Image (spheres, grey):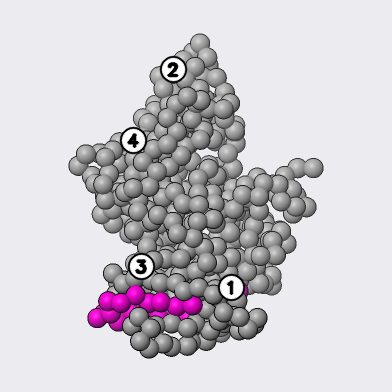
């Protein structure tokens, strides 16, 4: 029995086939994904062809991708009577309940707040809201948009350091990931103080680094989907850091490492990766950079030519190419495939979508509804802070709305004046498997919000109080 490659590779391949003009194969992929969705709305990291999970890691971007594919097909009127909405609603509910920390980011290695994962989640939630609104479910659409706005308003706070050291003149830039465990309801959300473990490095080498000193280009997904402009100052500065830390010039054109201090790749002697190695350059990342340059209005041809130069004689793109001067003695040449996987479906899909993007003169994966919401010039959405079982936030800004979100119906018993007075508010239900209460924070408020739960289904009190301070 064969197993399906990582869901991200499958969806990106389906999307690239759609970009190439085939509407039928991507629809079949979407139907297969809908049939393989788990009861809780999530998706396995990858699975056997019969839908049984193979690896059980949770990547929130892989929960978001089927929603994005469904919306691409919807926009092209290519669903042919198939209704993806039940799958979309379940997957969106999973994102709202389980995010924002992902157990694995797109490299399948680290847990925490990832710029690329957040980008896919924000975009998917807005697409899910569009599906809901198309079915005249305004309440669900609004809930999805509000949670997306919550994520969008926190992207920089979670994933941008203000104390960068990789380029001395640039202090503020995106990091690869802000480490956090999905099992910790009180994560440290400070990119300047967090540490990250890189476990694929050779035995005996340093494996723990300050998160602010480890970067990748995953933040470009914020531009891809229409969440940030290509000339956003933090995006531009982050690219300067990425180029300084990760860029490799080859005879075919530029290529990039995944992240600095990466140990996944051929060893220094050219031998295969075993328990550790040295990360090499990934052609996929040349395609991603090409999409950014297109969005920025720059010439994309050098990136297309580079990807073609990295490929095999039969046109297959490898996972990695050699990033050092030629080593004929070990059959390694700068810019040519190493012993890594080939083809890497993800890279081939990126190349096909880049060609389509150039033809259309716009990024194929850009979602107009996302761009309209976050780049349209009237971004006046209510600021939310979300408290829920897996993220029991301790602070909320004045003027924001504190949303208390739980999986079961409840009555919130709360005070904003140290219990001199108290209020009781019944939770509002949603179609997403959550119930919530919103508490607006007055601008003159200084005392904490204190609260507890009365569980209406079981007729029981929570038995403890919680507090959120005002900042």
The nearer-to-camera label among 2 and 3 is: 3
Cα separation between marks 4 and 3 = 35 Å
Disc ID at residue 326: 2
Q: Which numbered marker is on residue 245?
A: 4
At x 68%, y 61%, the residue is: 37
* Label 4 close to label 1 by CB (< 8 Å): no
User: Residue 407: which numbered mark, if any?
Assistant: 1
Pointer 2 and pointer 4: residues touching (CB < 8 Å)?
no
**In this rendering, is residue 39 above or below 181?**
below
Marks 2 & 3, CB-CB < 8 Å contact? no
In the displayed structure image, the side of residue 92 where residue 243 appears, left or right: left
Check the image and report above or below for 11 versus 408. above
Q: CA distance from mark 4 to mark 1?
A: 43 Å
Q: Residues within 10 Å of mark 1 (few under 14, many from 20)?
A: some
Residue at 34%, 44% in the rendered image: 212
Q: Height in image: 155 above or below 403?
A: above
Secondary structure under tag 1 reads loop
Q: Position of residue 441 (x, y in %)?
A: 33, 79
Q: Earlier in the sequence, mark 2 or mark 1?
A: 2
- List the residue tagged with mark 3: 395
- Residue range (magenta): 430-452
Q: Nearer the viewer, residue 28 or 149?
A: 149
Callout in the foreground (3, 1): 3
Give the mark nearest the N terminus, 2 or 4: 4
Query: Relative to the observer, which residue lies in front, 4 or 99?
Result: 99
Real-space Cα separation, disc 3 to disc 1, in angstroms:
22 Å
Q: Is residue 69 visible?
A: no
């Amino acid at each position: 029995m064969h197993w399906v490659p990582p869901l991200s590779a499958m969806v990106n391949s389906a999307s690239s086939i759609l970009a190439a003009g085939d509407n039928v194969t991507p629809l079949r992929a979407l139907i297969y994904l809908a049939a393989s969705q788990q009861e809780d709305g999530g998706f396995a990291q990858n699975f056997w062809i019969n839908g049984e999970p193979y690896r059980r890691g949770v990547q929130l971007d892989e929960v978001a991708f089927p929603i994005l594919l469904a919306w691409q097909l919807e926009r092209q009127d290519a669903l042919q009577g198939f209704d993806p909405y039940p799958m979309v609603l379940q997957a969106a509910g999973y994102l709202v309940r389980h995010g924002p920390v992902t157990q694995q980011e797109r490299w399948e290695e680290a847990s925490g707040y990832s710029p690329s994962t957040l980008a896919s989640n924000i975009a998917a939630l807005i697409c899910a809201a569009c599906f809901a609104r198309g079915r005249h479910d305004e309440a669900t659409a609004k809930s999805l948009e509000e949670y997306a706005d919550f994520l969008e308003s926190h992207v920089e706070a979670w994933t941008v350091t203000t104390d960068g050291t990789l380029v001395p003149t640039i202090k503020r830039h995106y990091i690869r990931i802000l480490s956090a465990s999905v099992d910790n309801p009180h994560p440290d959300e400070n990119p300047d103080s967090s540490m990250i473990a890189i476990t694929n490095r050779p035995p005996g080498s340093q494996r723990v680094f300050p998160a602010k000193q480890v970067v990748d280009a995953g933040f470009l997904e914020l531009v891809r989907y229409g969440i940030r402009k290509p000339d956003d100052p933090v995006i531009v500065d982050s690219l300067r850091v990425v180029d300084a830390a990760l860029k490799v010039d080859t005879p075919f054109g530029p290529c990039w490492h995944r992240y600095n201090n990466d140990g996944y790749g051929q060893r220094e002697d050219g031998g295969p990766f075993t328990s550790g190695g040295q990360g090499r350059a990934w052609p996929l990342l040349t395609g991603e950079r090409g999409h950014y340059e297109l969005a920025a209005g720059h010439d994309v041809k050098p990136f297309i030519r580079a990807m073609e130069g990295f490929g095999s004689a039969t046109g297959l793109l490898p996972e990695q190419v050699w990033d050092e001067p030629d080593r004929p003695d070990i059959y390694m040449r700068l810019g040519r495939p190493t012993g890594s996987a080939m083809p890497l479906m993800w890279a081939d899909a990126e190349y096909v979508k880049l060609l389509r993007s150039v033809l259309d003169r716009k990024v194929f994966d850009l979602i107009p509804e996302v761009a309209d919401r976050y780049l349209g010039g009237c971004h006046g959405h209510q600021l939310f802070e979300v408290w829920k079982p897996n993220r029991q936030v301790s602070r909320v800004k004045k003027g924001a709305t504190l949303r208390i979100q739980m999986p079961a119906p409840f009555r919130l018993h709360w005070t904003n004046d140290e219990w001199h007075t108290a209020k009781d508010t019944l939770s509002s239900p949603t179609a997403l498997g959550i119930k919530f209460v919103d508490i607006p924070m007055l601008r003159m408020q200084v005392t904490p919000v204190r609260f507890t739960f009365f569980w209406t289904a079981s007729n029981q009190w929570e038995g403890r109080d919680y507090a959120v301070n005002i900042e």
